[in-house]
Image (tube, helix red, strand yellow):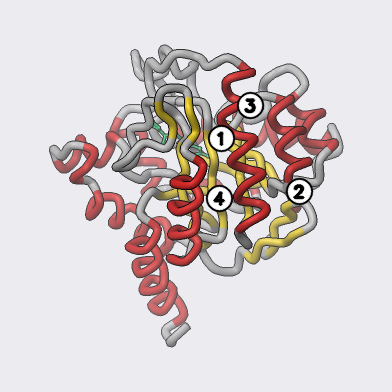
């Protein structure tokens, strides 16, 4: 449980690791400055951004070419390949960091692995035809995320009898499917999927009770950065959610989440280190 197998590397999970978000979508809601405009990748700018996040302490960079924003249009496979693969290749050749590829497409999973990616981050938890086979054939880690519905409709009417039970059940079945198909436990990370078919209350409950997922005995990833649950609590727009995001990071780190997925790496590192010192009651 302390190490995650990411291809030919291992990621130490004894302390909370920071995953920096690198969106290469035209409608990225995340960060100042787009990395993809007019159907062109700005590879040099992407590398500068990636380098900064690594310098600030990210041990994983999550590269995504498909927007999973509520209501977003699906992106074609070729376009997703064209956006993501050059970025994976560039970062793999220039930086010492684990590259995570945010995708549900088997072809992109395979091609990314060949170019040096270390992890597949799939918001559809390998639910697409061929995705489990693709991941098995690589040696990469995989993050299985829970989503109710699909990006087009997920926020219309999220409903659960018990959100903890249902999300846990779903993840448990996806893990079984992976194990039965030859993906080893040491490669799997779980994620309750904040904002993916959940109300604010569902999201708050998932974060407050993230320990509930410990029964699955796998590392946990928490992705709350700048999300609407923070906007709802604080009444703030996306670019004013840093403090709220850091509060959720502190909570996740206190509860010993293994990975946090964030836009603001430097600030997150300070919070994670501070929480770690308190957890350890010592300088770390
Ligand atoms: C609009 C809304 C744009 C939300 C982008 C997003 C997660 C993820 C995303 C997550 C894992 C974002 C999200 N969120 N993958 N991909 N976990 N594993 O904030 O919570 O980047 S997309």
Q: CA distance from mark 1 to mark 3?
A: 21 Å
**Residue 145: mark:** 1
Q: Nearer the viewer, mark 3 or mark 2?
A: 3
Q: Name the secondary structure under disc 4.
A: loop
Q: Name the secondary structure under disc 2.
A: helix
**Which residue ends up furthest to the bottom in the rendered image?**
282
Which of the 4 image quarters holds residue 73? top left
Q: Earlier in the sequence, mark 2 or mark 4?
A: 2
Q: Earlier in the sequence, mark 4 or mark 3?
A: 3
Q: CA distance from mark 4 to mark 3?
A: 27 Å
Q: CA distance from mark 1 to mark 2?
A: 15 Å
Q: Name the secondary structure under disc 1.
A: strand
| Residue matched to label 4 | 220
**Residue 185: mark:** 2
The response on whether ligand 1 sits within 8 Å of label 4 is: no
Q: Earlier in the sequence, mark 1 or mark 3?
A: 3
Tell me, yes or no, whether the two marked residues, 3 and 2, touch with CB atoms within 8 Å.
Answer: no
Residue found at x 60% / y 50%: 91
x%, y% of residue 52?
43, 60
Q: Earlier in the sequence, mark 3 or mark 2?
A: 3
Q: CA distance from mark 2 to mark 4?
A: 13 Å
Tell me, yes or no, whether the two marked residues, 4 and 1, touch with CB atoms within 8 Å.
Answer: no
| Residue matched to label 3 | 81
The response on whether ligand 1 sits within 8 Å of label 1 is: yes
């Amino acid at each position: 449980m302390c190490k995650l197998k990411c291809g030919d590397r291992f990621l130490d999970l004894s302390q909370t690791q920071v995953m920096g978000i690198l969106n290469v979508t035209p409608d990225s809601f995340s960060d100042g400055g787009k990395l993809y405009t007019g159907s062109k990748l700005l590879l040099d700018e992407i590398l500068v951004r990636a380098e900064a996040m690594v310098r600030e302490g990210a041990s994983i960079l999550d590269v995504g070419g498909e927007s999973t924003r509520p209501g977003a249009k699906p992106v074609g496979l070729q376009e997703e390949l064209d956006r993501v693969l050059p970025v994976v290749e560039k970062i793999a050749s220039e930086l010492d960091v684990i590259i995570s590829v945010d995708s549900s497409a088997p072809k992109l999973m395979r091609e990314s692995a060949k170019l040096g990616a270390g992890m597949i981050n799939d918001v559809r938890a390998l639910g697409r035809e061929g995705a489990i086979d693709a991941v098995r054939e690589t040696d990469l880690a995989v993050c299985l995320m829970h989503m109710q519905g699909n990006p087009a409709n997920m926020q219309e009417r999220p409903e659960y009898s018990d959100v903890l039970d249902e999300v846990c059940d779903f993840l448990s079945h996806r893990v079984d499917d992976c194990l039965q198909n030859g993906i080893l436990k040491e490669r799997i990370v779980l994620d309750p999927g904040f904002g993916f078919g959940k109300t604010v209350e569902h999201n708050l409950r998932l974060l407050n009770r993230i320990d509930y997922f410990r029964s699955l005995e796998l590392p946990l990833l928490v992705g709350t950065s700048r999300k609407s649950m923070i906007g709802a609590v604080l009444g703030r727009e996306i670019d004013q959610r840093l403090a709220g995001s850091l509060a959720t990071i502190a909570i996740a780190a206190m509860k010993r989440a293994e990975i946090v997925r964030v836009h603001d790496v430097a600030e997150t590192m300070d919070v994670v280190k501070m929480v770690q010192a308190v957890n350890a009651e010592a300088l770390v």
